[in-house]
């Protein structure tokens, strides 16, 4: 077993995911529009509104999936371990997509701004 209990592992990954999401929010919705790198206009409120449940839910999914994979590796039988690990990794990737949502929207706006000039 690792140095962390299963609950500590999930909590640690949730907090890291939440911290990453907050940094991405600040860069995507404060710094880039402030520097004039993107000009999303009215879409900014919509993106920000969507990014809150996606980010918090994504951080929760990352924490839950890391705990799920740890429990699976510790307790599951060898025949079902591979399938359950893939399922847990899929949940982690979905969570990461939720956390990175604001960055994807800001990057898309930045690329659109470059190609429309």
Image (cartoon, rainbow, N blue to C red):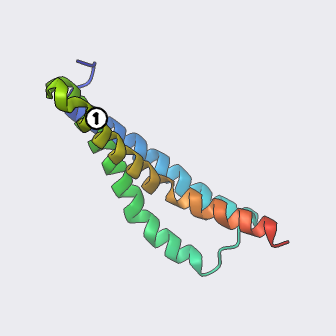
Q: Residue at x 62, y 62 (%)?
A: 106
Query: Residue 116 placed where, x, y %?
Result: 81, 73
Q: Quadrant of residue 35?
A: bottom right
Question: How many labels were placed on the picture?
Answer: 1
Kindly tell me whether residue 34 is visible in this rendering.
no
Tell whether 66 sits left or right of 72: right
Tell whether 76 sits left or right of 67: left
Q: Which residue is mark 1?
A: 85
Query: Residue 23 placed where, x, y %?
Result: 53, 50
Tell whether 66 sits left or right of 40: left
Query: What kind of element bears circle 1?
Result: helix
Residue sitting nearer the eye, 86 or 5? 86
- Quarter holding the N terminus? top left
Crowding at mark 1 (Cα within 10 Å: few <14, some 14-19, many 20+): many
Query: Residue 73 placed where, x, y %?
Result: 22, 26
Q: Residue at x 18, y 24 (%)?
A: 78
Q: Residue at x 58, y 64 (%)?
A: 105
Tell whether 86 sits left or right of 31: left
Query: Residue 47 placed where, x, y %?
Result: 52, 71
Q: Quadrant of residue 89?
A: top left
**Name of the residue lying farthest toward the right:** 117
Q: Residue at x 51, y 53 (%)?
A: 100
- Quarter holding the C terminus? bottom right
């Amino acid at each position: 077993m690792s140095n962390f209990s299963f609950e500590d592992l999930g909590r640690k990954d949730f907090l890291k995911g939440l911290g990453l999401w907050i940094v991405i929010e600040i860069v995507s919705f404060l710094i880039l529009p402030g520097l004039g790198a993107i000009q999303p206009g009215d879409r900014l409120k919509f993106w920000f509104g969507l990014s809150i449940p996606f980010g918090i839910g994504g951080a929760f999914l990352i924490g839950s999936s890391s705990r799920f994979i740890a429990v699976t590796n510790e307790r599951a039988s060898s025949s079902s371990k591979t399938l359950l690990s893939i399922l847990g990794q899929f949940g982690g990737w979905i969570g990461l997509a939720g956390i990175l949502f604001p960055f994807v929207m800001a990057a898309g706006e930045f690329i659109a701004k470059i190609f429309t000039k």
